[in-house]
Image: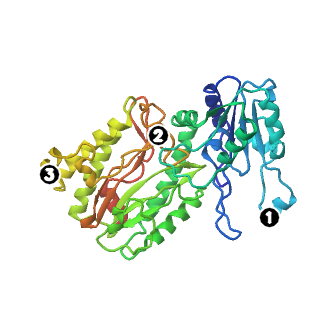
Amino acid sequence: MKYNQINPALFIENRKRFSKQMKSNAIAIFNSNDIMPTSADGTMKFIQNTDIFHLSGIDQEESVLLIYPDAKNADYREILFLKETNEHIAVWEGHKYTKAEASAISGVKTIMWLSSFKSMLHLLMGECETVYLNSNEHARAVVEVETRDARFVKWCIKNYPLHKYKRSAPIMQNIRAIKLNLEVELVQEACNITEKGFRRLLGFVKPGVWEYEIEAELVHEFIRNRSRGFAYSPIIASGANACVLHYNDNNKQCKAGDVILLDVAAEYGNYASDLTRSIPVSGKFTKRQRNVYDAVLRVMRGAIAMLKPGNVLVDYHKAVGELMEAELVKLRLLKLSDIKKQNPLMPAYKKYFMHGTSHHLGLDVHDVGDKHRKFEAGMLFTCEPGIYIPHENLGIRLEDDILITKREPKNLMANIPIDAEEIEALMNK
């Protein structure tokens, strides 16, 4: 791992939060992600399952976390099972955690090798009544590959059919939605790295540069600052490409007069940041581009002000849509008559602003959380309104990461240039 070691107090507290919501005399089991194959003997780079990381900080394959708060033997209330290394693995794959290292990272005192997992589980299943099993229940998840957690669910129910089974996901969604201060610090570091990458670009972009060259500048800056790279597939979309919401070919040349939509951000310590900026290839917006840009910025600032305790996503998105309606009328993209006769289920503004304004952010870019839950201090959201005008080859989106507090929202990206004048000045410096 490139990142500095995280304070284990974070993971100790997260396990306490999870345990408090478990039924009595219950075990919870979390598995690491697999190393995914490509083809032939190739593999993808390992990325840890965010649930086991949230609870342990363990960033290694073939790891299992067992939580049993009511275990009769206090040594078995938290157990980490790890892949045991050997000389062959050390030569071909490099260093793996020692038991002492895993304990220092996670705060878990009892560390065992994975080879003892089944026998230890059999012992503890004779004591417990309920088993919490983990699964990916994100509303937008499309899971076509069987995960290590999914395989374990089938194995466990087959071998222990008489136990009661419950889902860990609702508890994880509940506790992961509220970020502890140590988590906010990690996201802030990801934002700080993202800022360095963005500022680097402002002196680099000019007519004739290619989208992939911009991508290369960013990944260089991210990795040199202890990030593993992008928190998600980067969107570097110039001209008409900006109207494709998930464009990531990044293979076109940027032309004079175009605007580039940059949805690009770094991760740090597995925590994501999420930034979008729109900048003029030539270093200066046209009058029309500037009018659209400023309209999006006004909506963004109005939306950020609504990210306060007590609001809910459904009402929030509706209110942001009303802000957008007014701006689209000013831009002569909508008429008042369009709004009066609109279908409430598909408002007229959706023609130019078709996605939501905010989503949870954390270990996952689209982090877990209940969209019906009222906003609370400690929740972390993106704020990303946009206007997309295909017939003008223009798409503008702006996005910052916002922490809800008991008072005013805190913008973790407040230091990243966003005002059009500042962006133009830095590009022409």
Q: How is the image coloured?
A: rainbow
- Between discs 2 and 3, the one toward the N terminus: 3
Crowding at label 3, few (<14), some or many (≥20) Cα neighbours within 10 Å? some
Residue 36 drawn above or below residue 367: below
Q: What's the distance in space between the residues labelled 2 and 3, CA to CA?
A: 35 Å
Residue 225, how many percent across, how many down?
Answer: 58, 57
Instruction: Determine which residue is flagged by label 3.
Output: 335
Q: Which mark is residue 92?
A: 1
- Between discs 1 and 2, the one toward the N terminus: 1
The answer to whether residue 429 is seen in the rendering is no
Q: What's the distance in space between the residues labelled 1 and 2, CA to CA?
A: 40 Å
The answer to whether residue 56 is seen in the rendering is yes
Q: Residue furthest right?
A: 87
Instruction: Determine which residue is flagged by label 2.
Output: 380
Q: Residue furthest bottom?
A: 208
- Left-right relation of 359 to 318: right
The answer to the question of whether label 2 and label 3 lie on touching residues, with beta carbons closer than 8 A, is no
Of badges 1 and 3, nearer the viewer stands 3
Amino acid on which the number 2 mark rests in the picture = Leu
- Left-right relation of 19 to 127: left
Residue at 71% x, 52% y is 61
Amino acid on which the number 3 mark rests in the picture = Lys
- Left-right relation of 110 to 221: right
